[in-house]
Structures are given as structure tokens and as C-alpha cells.
Image: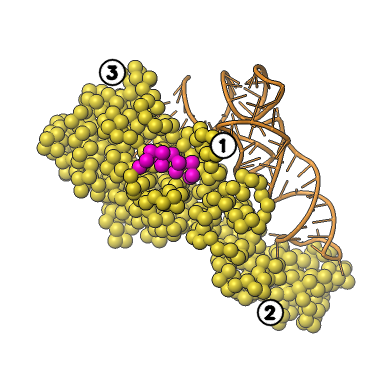
Amino acid sequence: MSGDDSAAEGPDDGGPTVDPHAVGRGGEGSADDHRAFWADAVADEVEARDPDDPVTIKGGVSPSGIAHLGNFNEVMRGYFVAEVLRERGREVRQVFTSDDRDALRELPRRLADTDGEIVELGDVNAGALGENLGTPYTDIPDPFEDGHDSYAAHFTALLAADAEALGVPVETVSNTELYADGAFDDVIERVLRDADAARETLAAHQDGVDGEYVPFMPQCSECGMLTQDVTEVDVDAREVSYRCSGIEAGDRFIEGCGHEGVASFREGKLPWRFEWPAQWEVLGVDFEPFGKDHAEGSWPSGVDIARDVFGSEPPVPMVYEWFTLNGEALSSSSGHVVTVGEVLGLIEPEVLRYFFARNPKKAKDFDVERLDQLVDKFDRFERAHFGEESVDDRLAALAERAYPFVVDEVREGRVRLPYTFAAVLGMVDDRELRVQLARDEGHIADDTPEWAIEDALERVERARRWAERCDNEYNYRLQSELPAHEFDAAVAAALDELADFVADGHDGEAIQEEIYETARRHDVEVGDFFAAGYRLFFDETQGPRLGEFLGELEREFVVKRLRREA
RNA sequence: GGGCUGGUAGCUCAGUUAGGGAGAGCGUCCGGCUUUUAACCGGACGGUCGGGGGUUCGAAUCCCUCCCAGCCCGCCA
């Protein structure tokens, strides 16, 4: 049978809904079934299958390089569904497969070291890495030589650390270990014993699958490369004979060593189209979210392979749209990435979890320059949950339902400093000064508990880092040393007079007023005088509201600085 | 070329599954905080809901068509 004749075998044949686009978008039920939170709609779908406990939710990626924010869709989309199911009394196991028997096919332009810091390919031994093209990630030495067993182990460890930082209890599973332990033996046997049926099923979805096609890729015992050149299959002995002839990688071909040998089922891998449904089978997967790249190719073929070859039902699927980073596609290989570790340096974990709680069907941009907007949105979401802000019904319903899954603990009385205000506070280092400024602005009250103040100040450090990273209009620092600058006579005289005023002891509001007055008395443009003030304290021509700011600083310091003495 | 998804205000998005008021935040502008300088408050401006056609008493929402973007249609994952 040729692939073209099988168009009628759509993925919707003979089973429950497997349209991956439909799930998470709501059901076809009555108005009562309408869900404010997509994870509830997905959980409905999972429970409708009446799965055995524990319900298993899977995600997975190849550890091909930096685990970036986009990869965390695999973790976070599953996480929310897991949490919803747990709340409904289900036992849930969330696993994440590191698809680490995949072969390195391309050298990524950028990598991440043991601390998650991004480094360029040139900073590691790229030549040594390049010799491993075509070899599974678990058989490639860790380029950072930091104690991990392999390239795969290095990057998988980073991803696991990021998941933990986000507070997601996910169990990482090494695909290579599943093969090595024989977990795949039975499914591989089934595939190869009925290779014709396997071929036929796959051919319906993929061109170029002919009678020669063997759905197993042995690993060469000499050079470690994977090969597609299987010369003989011995299903009973559970081994295949092969010739190491090399594999395709991207748009080129990597030559093998030519060795001819025999590999067991544990010494190789299934091609992806079979491996994915094999994972469902072996791990008993009930739900799996995946990116839109899998929606049209791998998913429909996986459904048919699961049903026709393995005789089992595929999991509940859900397609998520991809994020962009600053308007452009994330790409591990090109290095246009941001890691969870980096992001958590800029926003709180709950804000990032909120980012993932939003509609998975819509492409979202993660715009670092405008993180303040994301944080503002989270703050609104939080206030909506506590009924502290009137919002439209939709958001209110979402906030009521989803908020508890976004935060570690639902706790009233939290203080959230507006992000840009937190960035303003980041212009000074002194903790007490930050607190005082926040009090003046009304964000902290007399009866605000200490824990809430501590939590609130966490955001200041992050907003400070954001201002520095973006080098935006909040990236000012109070200068501890007197900036070198010459002022003209009128401005100098005005500054001296303002210094006297401050020395007399006035509050911030009065100082603000006096700045205007002083400028006028000396026939200095108000704008120029402010600029002089910003120059003295920030070595810039702009800054935060100056009078109030100076009113909070140590008086002696302000006076001396205005007199250009220190 | 075929298929799938998306396109709503300057920006980021909600609303589309189930037809009925076009919305939010930010930005901008104006005003307030006793007198331009970013934090706080109020108000205004702002959209042919990608274009066109159709169904309907009524369409951002349903149907058709076209345009644009991403993805898939690899013995890649």
C-alpha cells in the first residue's frame, strides 16, 4: 500500500478525540462544562478516559543544548494539568523524558555552563564536540567536564534544576537508561516482529518508507554512531546486524566508520516516529502536551502506530503555540534563548508560572524589555483573586481558579511593589532607605508584617537586574563618589543655596518645591537645574522625582554633594 | 503545492469552543499632586476585530474566498 491511498485513515478513526488542537480549548458540552482555566478542560478530557492511578503526564526534549524558556512548555503545561488532577484527588506522576539517545546533529552556537551561564561555542572545545556528530548525547563527553557523565547529563541536570527552581516536582527519565535497562525491549520486538505492519502504518504518514525500511537504529560498537543500515533482524535473539554507514544530519551526511557488527535491542534506538508512541506504551502516558511542530507529523502517525502496532490508546494530546523571545523565535542552535535561570533573576517564580498559565493556544511574546507589563499583569491577576480589584468576569474566573496553582501558598496581605517602582528603589542600595521610600509611597503600611516586607524587597533586586540588563530608563545608581562635572556660576550658586536649605532640615516635598524656587531666584532654567541635580547624584541628566528622593537620603551626604564637596 | 494554527487599539493581550454592549493594561496626550522631570491619582484620544463575500433580525465569533506569519508534509526530533 502506498501512502497516498491511505488518506481516509485520519487520526480520528476508531477512538476518543485525538485532535490535539481541540483539547484545552474547551469541550463540546453544555454551558456548565465551560472552563475558565484551560487545565481544567484538559483534566476533564483525561478523566473521561478513566485512567488508572497514578495518572501519568509526560513531556520531553532532546538535551541538544540550552534548555530555554520555550522548552518549559513541556514541563509547565503538564504541571498545571497535574495540579488540577491532584486537587481532584488523583495521584499524578509527572515525568519528563530526556530524549538523550538522540544523536547530536549540529553544534549549537551557544551552550550553558554548570551554573547555567550562557557561553559561546568557542569557549569550549568545539573540535572535540564536533567529532561526536551522529553519536547519542549520552555518549558524548560533557564539554564542561564538571562531573556529569555526558553532554546529555549536563544539560538534563540544568533543566531539572530549573524545574526545581520553578517548584515543579517533575521526574526526569533518561531515554538511554530506558533502552539500556531493557524497558523498550518488548515494544521493539513487537515493532520488528511485525515490521510490515509497522512500515505500512508509517508509510501512510511519511514518504520514502519502503520494504527495506527497518524501524530500528543500532549504535555502532566501534565508533558509537547511530546507523540506519540494518542488514539482518533476529527478533528471537533480540538483536540486529548492521553496517555503520553514517546518518543524515541536517542537510549533510555524516560518514560512519564502516564497521559491521551485531547490536541488541538495548544498543540502539527506535526512530522518533516509533519511539514517541513506544514511550507512551512503556511509561503508560495519559496526557502529553507538545509543540505545534509535532501536531501535523509525529502526532497523527503516533496515534496510528499506538493503535495499529501497539494496540493501545494514545494519550490525551494538547498542542501549545510557541513563544517568541523579544519578537523572534527561540532557537537553541542559533543561541537566541533565555533560560529559566536567567528569567528567575528578573521576575519571581510565581510571575513566570503565571506566564505559563495563560492560554496555550496563543503565541505569546516574552519581551524582556517589557517585563514590567508582565509583572503588572500578574499583580492584577493576584488582586483579582483576592477580590481587591474589579476586573471583567473572565479574568475574575480565571484568577479565582488558577491563582492557587501559580503561587506556592495562597496568602493574604502580600505586598507587591509595582515593578517599575521596584526598579526606582533599586537605584539605592540601602535596605532601610528602600523600605522608607516604599512607605512614603504608601506601599508599606505601619502594620505590614515583616515577612511581607521581605518578600516585597525580593522584587527590588530583580527589577534592579532588569534595569541593568535592558539599560533602560531605570538604570541609574546613586553615585557614591562625586561625579566630575563643571557647573556654570549661576547653577553652582543655586546648588549651594539648595544645600543650605537641605541643611536646615526639610522633608522631601519641601525640597522638591525649593528646587523650583532656587532655580528661579538664580535665573536658571528649571530643567537645567534638575539636570544638575541628576548629574550630581546619578551622573545622568534624568532620574526619579528628585526632591522626594533627596529627602530620604542622609542629610549630611546630600548637603556635601550639593556643595560638590564629596 | 497541500494541511494545521494564528492575525483584535501604537505595544502586550482578553474576548472566538456557545452569534447580541469592541474591551483591559501599558504607551501617548491632557489634567491633578500649590509652580515642566519618570514612583501616585483622574480623564481623553485611539480599532474597516487582516481584506472581501455569504448566512442571520443581529457576526470579532458561523460558512466561503483571498492576503500575511509560524509550523508540518524528511529513513530529523
Q: Label 2: state its secondary structure.
A: loop
- Whether A44 is among the magenta residues is yes
- Residue A60: % across, % down: 37, 45
Q: Amino acid at mark 3?
A: Met
Residue at 72% across / 80% down in the picture? A555
Q: Amino acid at mark 1?
A: Ala
- Distance from Cα at disc 2 to Cα at disc 3: 85 Å
Q: Which residue is mark 1?
A: A31
Q: Is residue A263 visible?
A: yes
What residue span does the magenta drawing correspond to? Answer: A39-51
- Distance from Cα at disc 1 to Cα at disc 2: 62 Å
- Residue A397: % across, % down: 59, 47
Callout 3 environment at 10 Å: few (<14), some (14 to 19), or many (20+)? few
Side (left or right) of A226 relative to A156: left
Q: Give the position of the N terminus of chain A as an image quadrant.
A: top left
Sequence-wise first label, 1 or 2: 1
Q: Return the residue found at the far left.
A: A237
As drawn, A514 above or below A189: below
Chain A appears in which tint? yellow
Colouring scheme, one of rainbow, by chain, secondary structure, one colour: by chain
Callout 1 environment at 10 Å: few (<14), some (14 to 19), or many (20+)? few
Chain B appears in which tint? orange
- Residue A249: % across, % down: 32, 37
Marks 2 & 3, CB-CB < 8 Å contact: no
Q: Which residue is mark 2?
A: A554
Q: Label 3: state its secondary structure.
A: loop
Q: Which residue is mark 3?
A: A1
Q: Amino acid at mark 2?
A: Glu
Q: Which mark is residue A494?
A: none
Residue at 48% across / 45% down in the picture? A39
